[in-house]
Image (cartoon, rainbow, N blue to C red):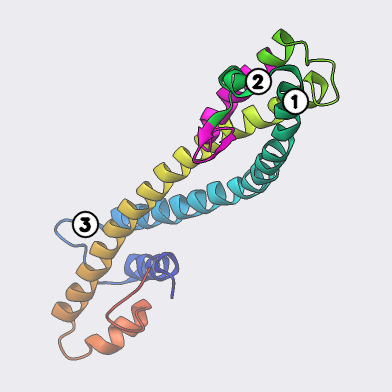
Amino acid sequence: MPLGILATTVAEKWQASPLPPLMWLSKDNFAAQVAAFVLSHQEADDTGDARTPQSKRLKVLDKTLDTSLRYVKGYLEEEYDDHEAYYGEFGIEKQGKNYKLPLGRPERVKALGKLLAALRKHKFDKKKYGLAYWQPLYDEYQPLVAGSTETAGARSGKVSQKDQGAAQVRKGLRSIIHHIKANYPDTWEAELRGFGFQKESFGG
């Protein structure tokens, strides 16, 4: 049984039960902790879902950028004998034996900015793979990368919050199990089941 469902059931049963509050944890406090945990769990999941379409689109764009770069390199090769000397201006860097756009997406955004400026400077802007081709790619790619970085940060925060909440909820559940055993020494197994515990250990 998922932790959130179990904890919600236990919190409700405890509220309605004659079993007294714990010294360190009241019934209302536990119910509030459980509600906060369930909410943070949902938020973390929602944030993760939001990343999926972004991630897919970014992968497609990355592939397009990599494929299209060869045309720009072709223009440089036609124009200059020492064409590789100009790669830096276009945001192209050496990776192993190849010259490519940077691997990291934030770095790619910067490199694309350089590429756009260099296309103008070297009069490639009117070519088929000039500004009319690269500008829309940049305009789509840049906000997606920014959004993806923010979402990753948000998800990380939500997951951390969720993990902290889970630890608190587990601590409460363990204490309630001991509480039930102490108050119902002869019938604790039945009482645990009545509270929603199917077994003494519980997962997340």
Point out the residue furthest to the top here: 121
Determine whether the residue tagged by mark 1 lies in a helix, strand or loop. helix
> Which x, y percent locates residue 80?
70, 17
Left or right, 194 with respect to 56, comes to left
Q: Which residues are magenta?
A: 94-117
For marks 3 and 1, the one nearer the N-term is: 3
Crowding at dot 2, Cα within 10 Å, few <14 / some 14-19 / many 20+, comes out as: many
Amino acid at dot 2:
Leu
The residue identified by callout 1 is 134
Query: Closer to the camera: disc 1 or disc 2?
Result: 2
Using the numbered discs, state the Cα–Cα distance from disc 3 to disc 1 in whole angstroms.
60 Å
Magenta stretch: includes residue 95 = yes
Front-most of 106 and 187? Answer: 106
Amino acid at dot 3:
Leu
Question: Disc number at residue 25?
Answer: 3
Q: Is residue 76 above or below residue 182?
A: above
The residue identified by callout 2 is 115
Q: Residue at x 36, y 52 (%)?
A: 32
Crowding at dot 1, Cα within 10 Å, few <14 / some 14-19 / many 20+, comes out as: many
Left or right, 28 with respect to 100, comes to left
Point out the residue furthest to the bottom here: 186
Q: Residue at x 68, y 43 (%)?
A: 63
Using the numbered discs, state the Cα–Cα distance from disc 1 to disc 2 in whole angstroms.
8 Å
